Amino acid sequence: MVQFKDLVIRTLVLFILFECSLSLEEKPRKTKKWMRNKIENLPKNLMENVLVKSLEGKKNTGDGPSQMNVLQLSEMTNQQSPCQKKHCGAGRVCKLTENGEAECVCISDCPVETEDRRRVCSNYNQTWGSDCEIHRMRCNCEEKSEKCSNPEFSHLHVEYYGACKQLSACSDSEMADFPRRMREWLFHIMQDLADREELSPHFKNKMNVAETNMTKLWSNAAVWKWCDLDGYPHDRAVSRHELFPIRAPLMYLEHCIAPFLNKCDDNSDHMVTLEEWGNCLEIPKETLEDECDDLRQELN
C-alpha cells in the first residue's frame, strides 16, 4: 500500500512538472529536467508537501502552476533537500538514504566520450577517456569497491590534458632554476589579479604593505596560491589532485612542472603542506604565514 502511494505521488509530481514546463516559454525542456532533479533529491516524506504546494498553485490560478509557483517550489526544495547543503568531491554525487539523509557516493557512470580532446593522461601514464573516468575510478578505489581495478588508483589523478605522450626530460640546470621562475610566475599572476581588482582585499593589502620587500612579496604569492589550491575540505594540506589546476595546463609548456611538484611532497604522503610548499619554492620558513582562515572569512 505504501509503495503504491509513493508511486501515485511520484506520477502526479512528474505530471505537474510536465504542466509547469509547458507553461513556461523560456527553455521549457531545461526547466522540466531541472525541476525533476530537484524533486528526485527530496526525501519521500517531503514529496507530499511539494505535491500539495503544486496543487494549491493550480487551484489559485485555475490553469496550472505559474512561473512564480515553480520558483516557490524550487525555493522549497532548496530549503528542504539535505543534498543542497552537502558538498561532494570530484567523482562523487549526493544521494539520499532511505532515512532521507544526504551521503556522497561514487558516480555510477560517465558519459561516453569519442573526441580526442576529452582524453586525459593520469599520473600512472595511462590515457583515459575523460577526467570523469579518472575521478570515478579513484572514488571506487578509495571506497574499496569491487569496481576498483587497482588498489593504487586511490591516488589516481589527472596529470595533464590530452593523450599520454613522451615529454622531454627536465635537466638538472632547469630544475635548479625552476623555483625562481615559479615564484616569479605566481607573483605576476597575483599582481595581475590585483590590477584587475580580482584579488581579495586581504592579499591586495599584503602586497601593498610588502611592495618594497621582494622576499615578502614572493612569500605572500606562495601563501595565496597554496590557500587557493587547498580546496574542500580545507585541511591545511594540498593533495596531488588539488595541484591539478597548476600542473595540467602547464605540462606541454613547462616540462619541469611535474617533477617540480612531485619534489614538493617531501615525505611522499600525497599531500603538500605549507612548509613543504615553501621549501619547494625556496622561501624562508619565517616569512610564511598561514592566513587562509582570514582569506576564507573575507570571501564568505
Image (tube, grey):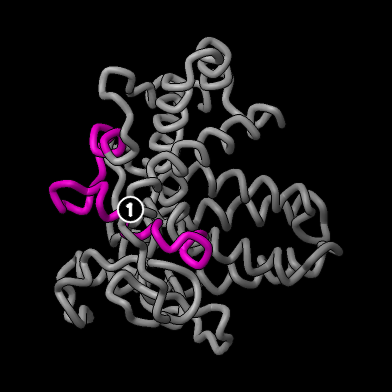
The amino acid marked with disc number 1 is Phe
Q: Position of residue 266 (x, y in %)?
A: 17, 46
At x 39%, y 76%, the residue is: 133
At x 66%, y 56%, the residue is: 55
Q: Which residues are magenta?
A: 250-279
Q: Position of residue 265 (x, y in %)?
A: 22, 48
- Mark 1 secondary-structure assignment: helix
Residue 254 included in the magenta stretch of the image: yes
- 142 and 286: which one is in front? 286
Q: For mark 1, what is the residue?
A: 260
Q: Is residue 246 left or right of residue 56?
A: left
- Note whether residue 4 is visible: no
At x 46%, y 64%, the residue is: 251
Identity of the residue furthest to the bottom in this view: 114
Mark 1, Cα crowd under 10 Å, few <14 / some 14-19 / many 20+, is some
- Note whether residue 275 is visible: yes
- 161 and 171: which one is in front? 171
